[in-house]
Image (cartoon, rainbow, N blue to C red):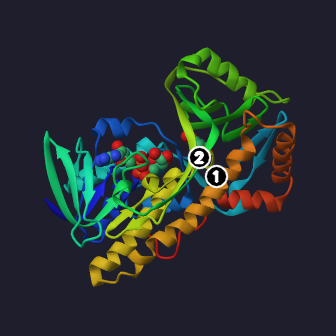
Amino acid sequence: MRTQVAIVGAGPAGLLLAHLLALRGIDSVVLERHTRAHIEARIRAGVLEQGTVDLLTKVGLADRLHAERLIHHGLELLFDGVGHRVPLTELAGRELTIYGQHELVKDLVAARLDTGRPLLFEAPAVAVEGVDTDSPVVRYVHNGRTEELRCDVVAGCDGFHGVSRAAASGLTVYEHEYPYAWLGVLAEVAPSSEELIYASHDRGFALHSMRSPAVTRLYLQVRPDEPLSEWPDSRVWTELRTRLDRTAGFELADGPIVDKAITALRSFVVEPMRRGRLFLTGDAAHIVPATGAKGLNLAVVDVAVLASALGRWFADGDPAGLESYSDTCLSRVWRVQHFSWWMTSMLHRAPDADPFTRRLRLAQLRYLTSSTAAATSFAENYVGLPFPEGAS
Ligand code: APR
Ligand code: PHB
């Protein structure tokens, strides 16, 4: 098989890229290792920046999102038993959208299948070759046979555990492990708060989020090596109530937990995000701790930059966008990496933290919730900085 752009991975990055390329008349083939049911059921984050929603709306992918999303204009930081609302939209002029990533993936898959363009499930890429030539090849397995997909360009959209990054030699890796992880639960119960609550408690971090008026999403800081078996539902609710409590009182409603998983927190970046005709996007190139809700939104910006660059290159041979792709994306990636690391370090209690560090974190929280300048800086990063010039 041959195409212009071979897209490895049908997550948000791969599926959105395929759509943006098709709008520019550029052919692509999307290869996905798992089944459609698997990728549409994968519970991930659920906060979309306004830039992400604006792009999805512009390209016709946001009909259900607009019908079902929740719109938020603020969030709460809870510490020392007191909740402090940060009026995000008032400070930074942008709103937040709550819409499950797996819901977005469903919309992107449906849109791709409606076009009739190739999206192959259970088709894992096993090798990406010839990235330094002008006709790279992706080898993949499908229906028990090893196939070849020849192309002009390979888009590595296969996430942190994909194969495309390994095809790019000479990359520099930057990474940071956090001494804690997140236990995430999805509960079939109405949220107990209108907006998100980020709690920094002496026992550890907790987050109250949601997916809909009937589904609550909650997270607890746990040890990185903690087995899920140590967290029966009763213990999860007890610990959440402790960490989300406040002097004014707070009733956390509970209900059936339908998804429970422990996820490591990690910061990771590869430089550059390109090798020859291979372009890495989203989690294939960078990982941020979920605290800032940035993973999906970063992937969207990478893909918008890449789609614009490929559009110019295929249309009139102008390589400028491709040559600046990595630098353009990395500039935002590092800003978002810093914000996510800073927010994570401020809200989480490291297991070996000394009293001095705890006081520093409290001082940071008190400053952030008492200074308009500090809150505005937080807000503009949290709601998402404007897209790079030309990314669309
Ligand atoms: N061949 C084909 N597909 C693959 C391969 C492979 N060898 N390896 C991985 N994949 C698929 C995965 O099954 C997944 O569907 O690539 C896709 C990668 O999707 P994501 O991991 O969601 O990454 P991305 O599209 O960059 O989106 C980033 O997803 O993981 C979250 O927190 C992350 O919100 C962020 C967003
Ligand atoms: C979520 O709703 O899954 C969520 C919200 C905010 C975060 C991380 C995850 O920072």
| Residue ID for mark 1 | 340
Query: Residue 159: in sight, yes or no?
Result: yes
Ligand 2 within 8 Å of disc 2? The answer is no
Q: Tell me the kind of residue under disc 1.
A: Ser
State the residue at coordinates (64%, 17%): 235
User: Number of labelled discs?
Assistant: 2
| Residue of label 2 | 289
Residue 14 x, y percent position in the rendering: 35, 55
Residue 355 placement (x, y as % from top left): 86, 37
Comes first in the chain, label 1 or label 2: 2
Q: Amino acid at mark 2?
A: Pro
Q: Residue at x 55, y 35 (%)?
A: 213
Whether residue 212 is visible, yes or no, is no
**Residue 268, position as x, y percentages in the image:** 54, 52
Label 1 residue SS: helix
Q: Nearer the viewer, residue 87 or 257?
A: 257
Query: Mark 1–mark 2 contact, CB under 8 Å?
Result: yes
Q: Is 54 rendered above or below residue 186?
A: below
